[in-house]
């Protein structure tokens, strides 16, 4: 708690009386939304005590507080991942900081690989549920009773009413709103074709290396969570081509304007 309180105090000193209720985490290649925020205060992660610093291309590594669609929001322009060498408590540290800052709703975004063969690069998939069999639990170890119970319920991590609102907006903008199951894998390797076949059998529609630990911590803290994946590539074995992070960023760049409009409209509700 000392670390959380130190971080919260530092941020509050920077933002004064500003009290955002909505936080958004911007994934790989999706930082364009940060350009839309006005009256903003920008704090590089490296300046924030105890804050994990992003090292991945496409993650700017800055906390932004300002106005979007008339709402005061807090945005993480980039995130830290388990595969960068952080343990999961470090990677999700910002989520509990958000809770202490008074955040009530968390919007998670990511770039993901399509597992469902009916998907195509450029689609947006709202996460209705997730699989996370292949990584340790982010809540492993002594429970933080200040934030939530030892055994939190996981039946509705992603809020149904929020999913419905976002689905309607994505359908309006793209005509192809997807709602599916996201599989969390540790990375940094992309999955093998056999792993993708297994995930599809288990019911996964998309796969990625983030978001689930953040969603679990947010759920533990009692935050309202909605999450959306930009399908930036088809997962291993579906197409006869190798996977690359360049493809991820290229697809995100192609659809970033639509993504920006979708999130702006959602925040305006």
Image (cartoon, rainbow, N blue to C red):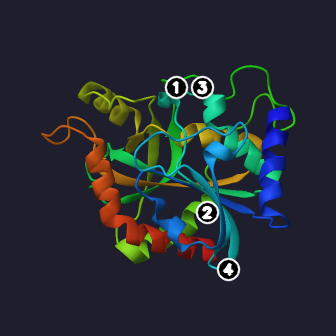
Q: Secondary structure at mark 3?
A: loop
Q: Are marks 2 and 1 in contact (CB under 8 Å)?
A: no
Outermost residue toward the top in this view? 141
How far is the residue under mark 1 from the one under mark 4?
A: 37 Å
Rendered image quadrant of residue 192: top left
The mark that comes first in sequence, 2 or 3, is: 3
In the image shown, does 235 or 5 lie closer to the viewer?
5
| Camera-side mark, 3 or 1 | 1
Disc 3 to disc 1, C-alpha distance:
7 Å
Q: Secondary structure at mark 4?
A: loop
| Mark 1 or 4, nearer chain start | 4
Residue for badge 3: 87
Mark nearer the viewer, 2 or 1 = 1
Q: Earlier in the sequence, mark 2 or mark 4?
A: 4
Decide which of tag 2 and tag 1 comes sooner along the chain. Answer: 1
Please give the name of the residue rendered at 26% of the width and 49% of the height, measured from the top-left corner: 247
Q: Residues within 10 Å of mark 1 (few under 14, many from 20)?
A: few
Name the residue: 46% across, 28% down.
186
What's the distance in space between the residues labelled 2 and 4, CA to CA?
19 Å
Q: Of tags 1 and 4, which is closer to the observer?
A: 1
Query: Which residue lies under the disc numbered 2?
Result: 162
């Amino acid at each position: 708690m000392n670390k959380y309180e130190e971080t919260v105090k530092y941020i509050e000193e920077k933002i004064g009386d500003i009290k955002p209720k909505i936080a958004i985490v911007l994934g790989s290649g999706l930082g364009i939304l940060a350009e839309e925020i006005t009256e903003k205060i920008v704090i590089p992660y490296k300046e924030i005590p105890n804050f994990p610093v992003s090292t991945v291309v496409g993650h700017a590594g800055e906390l932004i507080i300002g106005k979007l669609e008339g709402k005061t929001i807090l945005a993480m322009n980039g995130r830290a991942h388990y595969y960068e060498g952080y343990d999961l408590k470090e990677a999700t540290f910002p989520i509990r900081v958000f809770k202490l800052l008074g955040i009530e709703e968390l919007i998670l975004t990511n770039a993901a690989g399509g597992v469902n063969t009916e998907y195509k690069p450029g689609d947006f998939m709202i996460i209705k549920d997730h699989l996370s069999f292949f990584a340790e639990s982010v809540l492993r170890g002594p429970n933080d009773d200040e934030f939530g119970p030892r055994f939190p319920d996981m039946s509705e991590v992603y809020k149904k009413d929020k999913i419905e609102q976002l689905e309607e907006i994505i359908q309006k903008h793209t005509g192809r709103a997807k709602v599916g199951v996201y599989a969390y894998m540790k990375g940094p390797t992309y999955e093998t074709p056999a792993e993708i076949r297994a995930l599809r059998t288990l019911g996964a529609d998309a796969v990625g290396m983030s978001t689930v630990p953040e969603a679990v911590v947010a759920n533990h803290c009692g935050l309202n969570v909605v999450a959306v994946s930009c399908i930036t590539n088809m997962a291993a074995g579906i197409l006869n081509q190798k996977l690359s992070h360049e493809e991820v960023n290229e697809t995100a760049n192609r659809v970033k304007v639509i993504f920006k409009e979708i999130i702006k409209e959602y925040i305006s509700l």
